[in-house]
Image (cartoon, coloured by chain):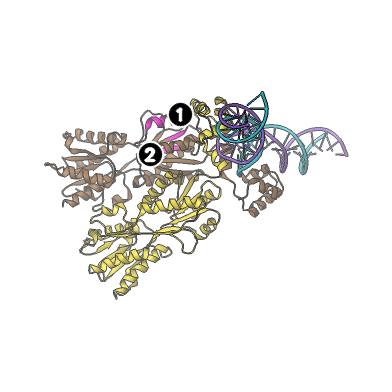
Chain colours: A yellow, B brown, C purple, D cyan
Amino acid sequence: MATIHQVAKQAGVSVATVSRVLNGQNSVTAKTRIKVEDAIKKLNYEPSLLGRNLRNSESRLLLVLIPNISNPFYSEIINGIENTAIELGYNILLCETDTNVERENIYFDLVRKKMADGIISMDPAVNIDTLIQLAENHAIIQCSEYAVDSGIPYVTIDNAEAAYRAVKHLIRIGHQRIALINSDEKYLYARQRQLGYQKALEENKMELEDSLIVHTQGLDFSYGQQAMKKILAQEERPTAIFAVSDLLAIGALKEIHNQGLKVPEDIAIIGFDKIAFSNMTYPALTTISQPMYAMGKAAADMLVKKIQGKEVESLILDHELVIRESTLG
Amino acid sequence: MATIHQVAKQAGVSVATVSRVLNGQNSVTAKTRIKVEDAIKKLNYEPSLLGRNLRNSESRLLLVLIPNISNPFYSEIINGIENTAIELGYNILLCETDTNVERENIYFDLVRKKMADGIISMDPAVNIDTLIQLAENHAIIQCSEYAVDSGIPYVTIDNAEAAYRAVKHLIRIGHQRIALINSDEKYLYARQRQLGYQKALEENKMELEDSLIVHTQGLDFSYGQQAMKKILAQEERPTAIFAVSDLLAIGALKEIHNQGLKVPEDIAIIGFDKIAFSNMTYPALTTISQPMYAMGKAAADMLVKKIQGKEVESLILDHELVIRESTLG
DNA sequence: TAATTTTTTGTAATCGTTTACAATACAAAT
DNA sequence: ATTTGTATTGTAAACGATTACAAAAAATTA
C-alpha cells in the first residue's frame, strides 16, 4: 500500500505535485505529470480516502434511513437514490432501523461523527424531535413520510388526494360499502390517506362506519391478512377494500382467496404504491402508482444540494391510479 | 463542532487524556475523567470518525455487493448482514451493480482506497478475476454465488442437491414431463441447479429434452412470464415446472393463469428461495427454503474475522423443501 | 524523610491527504 | 545581461484523532 509520499519520492517530485496530478489540476507540466503517473502505476498507488476525507472534512457518504429493507417500496426508491448519488460522487450507507430507537441512534451518530454527510430519512417512525435537532447542523431530507413545519425539506406525493381518487374509483364502479385497511394513525401518511378515504365517502353521502376501518401494527403481508380476517368476520361484509399499501392489499387478497371468495366479483380491492409484485397477483392489483424512482432521485439531488449549502424546496410529485383486474367492474 | 483539542483545553488536560477517556482506558483518575466528561458535555463534543479512522487505518465499513436491491432474496440476506455488522461495530455500504462493470469498479475502488474494510459479494455476475486479485490484499467473502477454487471463502447452500430434491418431489407426485426455467448458465448456481434437475430425471429414467429447459436473461417476474409463454407454446406441454428462483416461478404462475390454466391441476410449479411473497401467491408456491438470514449473518461474521486477520472456512448451510399448494398432488 | 515503584498525565509523532504560501525555474522584454 | 512576469514546483501546516515514550505525581517502601 503505497502512500503519496512514496509516489513523490519515486517520481522525484513533492507530494504537492502528486496531489495536483491526482486532482487533475492544470498547473503541472506534461513532463512531470508523466513522471508522476508512471510512479503511480509502478507503485500501484491508490489514494486513501481516509486521508482525503479528513483533510476535506467530508465523507462523501449519504445515510439512507429506512424502516425495513424487505419492503419493495423502499427498494425502488433506494434505486433512485443510489444511481443519483453515484453520479454526484457519493455512496450510500443503508440503514435499517426496524423501528428501533437504539438502532436509530447508532445511525444518527454516524452523521454526528462525520462519517456521513447527510441523511435521507424514509422512516415514518423516526424520532422527529431528534431529527429536527440534527437538522440544525446537518443536511437532512425526508422522503415519502415527512413532518409538517419541521423545516426539513421533503419529497412526497399528495397522499390525501391519491387515497381520495382510489376510493372514488371504487364508488364510481358501484361500491357502496368500502373498507379501509390502514396502518397506524400515528403516521402522517396514514392520517392523510384516511382523510382522502373519508372525503370520498362523505362527498357521496356514504356513511363512515368505524367497523369498516381496520388499523394494522405493521406493513407485512401477514398484517393485511389479519386485517382482512377481521373484516370478513363481520356480519355485513364490505364489497370493496382500499389498503394503504400493496403489501397489505396482497395479504388481504390472500385471505379473501382462503375464504373461497372471488376478486373482484365478491370483493374488489385496491392497493397503494405499485410495487412490482402488485402486477403478479391473481388477479392483478389495482393500485396507486408512486413515482418511487423519481422520489429517490429527487431526494438525493436535494440532499447533495443541501450539503453544498444551497437552499432546497420541498417537492410534491405526481401519482397515478392504475386500474387493473382487482377492481374490474 | 468541537475537536478533541478544544475539549482538552476546556477540561484543562491534554488531548491524550481526552482520548483515553473517550476510549474507556482505565489509566485515568476519576477526578480527571469527570472533568473531561463535563467538558465533552459542555461543548457537545462528538469525536470525528474521519480522524479516528485515518489514525487507525480502518473505515469500519463493509461493502455489500448485490446485483439488484429489488430482489427480496437479497433483502433478507442483507438483514442478516446488517444486524451482525452492527453488533460487531461495523456499518454496511450497500452497492448495487446492476451487472454493470463500471459501477462495479466504482465500488471496488472504495475498498482499494480504504473507504471499506472488506467486501461481501453476492453478485453472480461479478468480475471474478478482479475479485480474486482484490482478495490478495483485502478481506473478501462470497455469499450465495461463489467461484470454486478461487481461494475466497464463501457461504452458500448445496444447490445441486436442493434442485435434485425439488425435482424428485415433482416426480414422486407423479409428474413425467418437467420443465426447467433456469437463468443463464454462466452462473454457477444455475449450472448446479440444472445438474440437480438432470440427476433427478436420469435417476428416474426420464428423458432429458432440450425443449423443456428454458434459460432467461434475468430474474425479474417478466422473464419468468416470458419463459412460461415459450413453454406453453410447445405442442407437448409439461405437467410441472421447476424454476430456479421464486421470482421466475411467480412470473410463470402469472402466465399460466393468463392462459386460463389451473395450478396445480393442469401444471404444478415449484420455485426456489422461499421469499416472503411466495406464500402470498394463489396458490401458495412450493419452494426451496434458503436460510437467507443465517447466510447473511455468517457472511458478516466471516468477513469481520477475515478483516481481523483470522482464517475462515467456507460454509454450506442447510436448505429445506417447503411443500405448499402449487404442487399438491 | 528519602528512595523507589507505580500510576497518571503530557509531549509530540503519526495516519495520508490537500493547499496557502514561498521559492524556484523559465520565458519574454528591455 | 538584467529585469520582470508568469508558470511550476516545493515546504510545511492543516484536518482530528491515537499512542509510544517521557515526565510528573502519587503511593509504597525502607
Label 1 secondary element:
loop
In this rendering, would A138 be left or right of B297? right
The residue range painted magenta reads: B119-140
Chain for disc number 1: B
Task: Identify the residue at horizontal 37%, vertical 53% (top origin).
Answer: A294
Compare marks 1 and 2 and give the one earlier in the sequence.
2
User: Residue type at mark 1?
Assistant: Glu
The quadrant holding residue B81 is: top left
Between the residue at mark 1 and the residue at mark 2, the CA separation in whole angstroms equals 19 Å
The quadrant holding residue B178 is: top left
In this rendering, would B187 be left or right of A110? left
In depth, the one of A109 and A30 nearer the eye is A30
The quadrant holding residue A99 is: bottom left
Residue position marked by numbered label 2 in the rendering: B122
Task: Identify the residue at horizontal 34%, vertical 61% (top origin).
Answer: A244
- Where residue A182 appears, x then y in whole percent? 36, 64
Residue position marked by numbered label 1 in the rendering: B136
